[in-house]
Image (cartoon, helix red, strand yellow):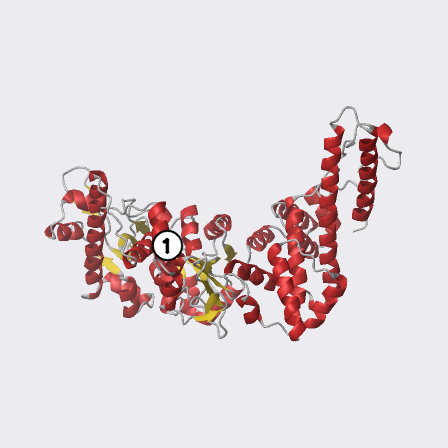
Amino acid sequence: MGINLHEGLIEEIRNRSDIVEAVSKYVNLKKAGSNYKGLCPFHHEKTPSFIVSEEKQLYHCFGCGEGGDIINFIMKMENLDFIDAVTTLGEKAGIRIEEASSKEEKKEFENRNRIYEMNREAALFFYSNLIKKENKGLEYLKERKVDLSTIKKFGLGYAENQWEALNNYLLKKGYTQEMILSAGLVLKRNQKDGCYDRFRNRIIFPIINTTGKVIGFGGRALGDEQPKYLNSPETSVFNKGRNLYGLNTAKKVLGKEKRMIVVEGYMDVISLSQRGISNVVASLGTALTKEQAALLKRYTDEVYIAYDGDSAGQAAALRGLEVLGEAGCDVKVVIFTQGKDPDEIITKKGKKVFLDELEGALSLIDYKITLVKKENDLTTIEGRIKFVKAIAEIIKQLKSPVEVDAYIKKISIEAQISEDAIKTEIYGNNRYNQPVKMHKPIVSGEKHRSKFERHTNKYNIESIQPTEKLGYLEAERGILKLMLMNKQYFNNVVSTFPELNFTDPVHKKIAKLVARAYEDMDVIDMDSLMNQLDINEITILHNIKKVIIPEDNTQKALIDFMNQIQKFDLMKRKKDIETELKEMEKKENKSQMEIARIRELCIQLEKILKELKHL
């Protein structure tokens, strides 16, 4: 009886649901222009910046950047997955979500439910073993300073050193041997009939999904058994590469905490949680997978990898950084200086020391640099050369010219090697890695032009690219940020850019509203400004506010922005002229008027190229 969801049904549920009504149950909303406004439920704030659009059925927080439709809102507020959120909204809207009716689907659904039931029974069995009397499991947890409340919170248990304790317990509960085998709780004997328990003489860590169901177990050996840590096998409800230990508890604090900490072991999660750091998950003994990264991304953008400091932990951290980066997370690595792992640091040094270590977390590039530095002796010339060569390969992977420049400066200081030498190492003799492109003449009939008029693109200026357009839009946003900062900056912008001729229509609208506001007052009332914008325009305003302007040199910033805009405008005109020239070149028999037009265009093109050269 699986759920039969399709896009049409989901859209109907969206259409029948009212986001203002839904959000009002959690947030005190007040009418603000065409929108509603209130205090954001996803982060602490004193001034309302949470906007709900009744017209577009969307929400957006100007403060923290959270946004989406009614389904996203219910998922985040109720900590539900997509299917559960849609089902909840469907029930409220009076829409019956039909159950899948095929025999195969029904059988699969029933099997999954039985495994959930058996896992729950097994978890209760292990928990009862742990707390009913003194035993090795309880002694171990006491030594690790785990208290009773934490044992209850995580449902920890103990598998006694017996061969068939759990198997016999579940058989008595009415489950067949085949069912128990399908849950991965027992193994078949090799030389005779029957089964024996998978987990024996181990501390048991139930693995619980985000809807509160026990999907599998992890077990830590209390003796010399190998492996030291053992997980449930793959079943119809459990795949360790798609789940994270502790996410069921960590997700509950993500309204207050924006970052998620990823650790290696169960005990790291438990020790940190017991001492007030609950935004922690463990990766179930595997390197982080794409599925786990996507799962984390659903709950947060900011992820800190806090693996053990040994070589295996370092390698896993590097892989995790790459996978999380590809998933779009802002990811950092914690390098521990006060202990070998999170459990040891929080237990022996305390919460403050652990949080201090967390604040010193490094980005992917900085972490790689740190590892390379450990491998090379920078007090020797040979060590510094090897260090720079290795870092050059890392810097080549960067896409941002700003990042490249910053890291070249950093490495130059650390290795005591000139920036020019490092650039040459990265790019070869052509340090900017941009080979000169010779352009063919646009017009084949050179006889129609004077030598001066002939375009050879001697300045090697490229045609307009999408990145230029992005830079142009960023420049417009920079100018708008200056206009918003204060009236003096606004007047300075207007004197330099009197027509406020923005290309982007939203930028143009915001500029006009700002200009109108300064006619009546000396400061911008952001609430009043937002009330005149729709939710998508508010998002753009939010991005404008995030633009960083060096306050000690706003005039230079303005000039840079203006140059960027002027460059884009010239590049666009250049491209238009080149397009027209190419079209005219195709004509075999040109009229005198067309020849004159070609000359005129070539003169304009030469003028534009000269202007571009001086920008």
- Kindly indicate the quadrant of the structure image that contains residue 57: bottom left
> Residue placed farthest to the top in the image?
588
Please report the residue visible at 44 percent of the width from the left and 60 percent of the height from the top: 260
Question: Percent x, y for residue 416?
Answer: 71, 55
- Kindly indicate the quadrant of the structure image that contains residue 244: bottom left
Q: Is any part of residue 538 visible from this angle?
A: yes
Question: Percent x, y for residue 34?
Answer: 49, 65
Q: In this view, does 325 lie above or below 336?
A: above
Please report the residue visible at 30 percent of the width from the left and 57 percent of the height from the top: 93
Determine whether, in the image, residue 4 is placed left or right of residue 314. left
Q: Is any part of residue 547 visible from this angle?
A: no
Q: On the image, numbered disc 1 is attached to which residue? A: 14
Q: What residue type is labelled 1?
A: Arg
Determine whether, in the image, residue 409 is placed left or right of residue 135. right
Determine whether, in the image, residue 82 is placed left or right of residue 467. left
Please state the total of marks drawn on the protein image: 1
| Residue density around tag 1, few if under 14, some if 14–19, many if 20 or more, within 10 Å | some
Q: In this view, does 592 lie above or below 574?
A: above
Please report the residue visible at 82 percent of the width from the left and 32 percent of the height from the top: 593
Q: In this view, does 611 lie above or below 554?
A: above
Q: Nearer the viewer, residue 550 or 179?
A: 550
Q: Which of 516 and 141 is in front in this view?
A: 516
Q: Nearer the viewer, residue 475 or 505?
A: 505
Determine whether, in the image, residue 258 is placed left or right of residue 377. left
Question: Percent x, y for residue 478?
Answer: 66, 60
Question: Percent x, y for residue 592?
Answer: 84, 30
Report helix, strand or loop for mark 1.
helix
Q: Nearer the viewer, residue 259 or 590?
A: 590
